[in-house]
Amino acid sequence: MTDDVSKPQPDALVQLLAASSALEPVQTTGPVQTTGPVQTTGPVQPEGASTNAAANPTAGNAWLGRYSHSLMGVFGTPQRVLVRGNGALVWDADGKEYLDLLGGIAVNALGHAHPFVTSVVASQLATLGHVSNFFTSPTQIALAERLLALCAAPKGSKVFFANSGAEANEAAFKLARAHGKKHSPEGGPARNTIIALEGAFHGRTMGALAMTAKQAYREPFEPMPPGVLHIAFNDIAALQSAVDETVAAVILEPIQGEAGVRPLSAEYLQAARDITRRAGALLILDEVQTGIGRTGEWFAGIPKTGANAGPNASDASDSRAAIGSVDVPDAVTLAKGLGGGFPIGALVTFGAGPSELLSAGQHGTTFGGNPVATAAALATLHVIESTDVLENVRRVGAVLRQGLAATKGVMEVRAFGLLIGFDLDHPIAAEVVRMALDAGFIINSPGPSTIRLAPPLILTEAQANQFLAALPGILAQAAQAAQAAQGATSTKGESS
């Protein structure tokens, strides 16, 4: 992928706005030079850290000591202290290099420190950083227009910008309740139920958490906001039975990432559209993790028509993604890869009906849609569109899928572009993650026997093959470690 966007461009923001709108580009007062990521050639010592090797064996340990005393423990102990990134590679505070196969959990779509994105962000921040939502900005308007085009959204569709996937889903929650309130029959049952699926993950704020299925996430904060029903995954009969005149909306992830990369079938997605339409309920797709090219298409559950079709798209009759798509949802939530590493989320509403449900003052956010975040998202979309990123996702994803399927100890592979889950023959996923990190690979285990990969969309075939070559050894080491731990536990039990 060689293109001008692979290099820093001081006037990148001006160019981007000119390309995104028929309006005259906004002129900045001067170019902002960005020469690339800050270089760290060795271990990064925190201020005040001891230089005594015995007292402070690594810079990373010193930082982690400070972390434990200053940050809440909601994430547990961080695995490493990362200080620099470039493309699909990152380095920790002790100078060790890692191949990032998680991408900040599907966030760093273009990898780390992408020159064009950093140029645009720096230029925008030097021009106008934050204005509040009493005002708007050219980047906010241009990004909304671009998303509507990519979604092939019909006339009357709109966008609401937030700061994360959870916030986008909170907005969707309120959209559903507003729809239910507007369409509840006078004197009849209230239409306020929201249906989600078993295995669903929609975020950790209270509305999003209510739609999230995992009890371990929910139980400490119960009671949840009422009116959310979880039904069986990919079960059309269960959906048909659950959706009645009391249901305001059904929210679905086309692929459940947190549950181990589980796809809904094409038949289920279409049935969901048909069932909700007949019942007068909204259909909301959560594409926080699957959207913005992650699967090798712009979206996993929206048909490839119009601006999102790409140069290799077929006609609409057979243009479904690998997991299928619905004809037109009522709303879609986006985040993660949208900002290329910069925090941003979005709720896209399709058509005038859903788009008019939330009126002035009924929802809002201080930082949502700020000039810097929307500039970062515009830059990310521009790079994906103007280079062969989507083709790279499909090509490298196929390399990983085929290589994983041929690896001893891997039982099943579920791969959709560069969102990949694979199941192991033993519940040693936690050990695999640890051994992979020691070997210089960042991966994730959403379950005891499942590994998830969500690397930058610019991952190369050579990097994919590097991981595949190392994986058998990592699996063997993990199996040995798990066996040793089990033996130690058995010995301890016998001696007690």
Image: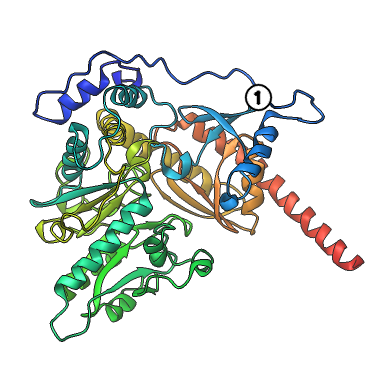
Residue 43 is left or right of residue 327, and the answer is right
Residue 491 vertical placement versus 180 (above, below)? above
Instruction: Say which quadrant the N terminus sits in.
Output: top left
User: Horizontal and vertical percent for residue 460?
Assistant: 44, 30
Compare residues 424 and 344 and report the one nearer the observer: 344
User: Horizontal and vertical percent for residue 2?
Assistant: 34, 20
Residue lying at 28% horizontally and 57% vertically, measured from the top left: 171
Compare residues 218 and 255 and report the one nearer the observer: 218
Q: Please tell me in which quadrant of the rendered image residue 115 appears.
A: top left
- Crowding near the residue tagged with mark 1, few <14, some 14–19, many ≥20 C-alpha atoms within 10 Å: some
* Residue 418 can be seen in this image: yes
Residue lying at 24% horizontally and 55% vertically, measured from the top left: 363
Residue lying at 36% horizontally and 74% vertically, measured from the top left: 226
Instruction: Say which quadrant the C terminus sits in.
Output: bottom right
User: Horizontal and vertical percent for residue 155?
Assistant: 7, 51
Q: Identify the residue under disc 1.
A: 45
* Residue 323 can be seen in this image: no
Q: Please tell me in which quadrant of the rendered image residue 338 appears.
A: top left
Q: Secondary structure at mark 1?
A: loop
Compare residues 358 and 382 and report the one nearer the observer: 358
Q: Please tell me in which quadrant of the rendered image residue 441 appears.
A: top right
Residue 208 is left or right of residue 18, and the answer is right
Residue lying at 22% horizontally and 77% vertically, measured from the top left: 191
**Number of numbered discs on residues:** 1
User: Horizontal and vertical percent for residue 80?
Assistant: 62, 37
Residue 396 is left or right of residue 236, and the answer is right
* Disc 1 residue type (three-letter): Gln
Compare residues 308 and 34 and report the one nearer the observer: 34
Residue 94 vertical placement versus 471 (above, below)? above
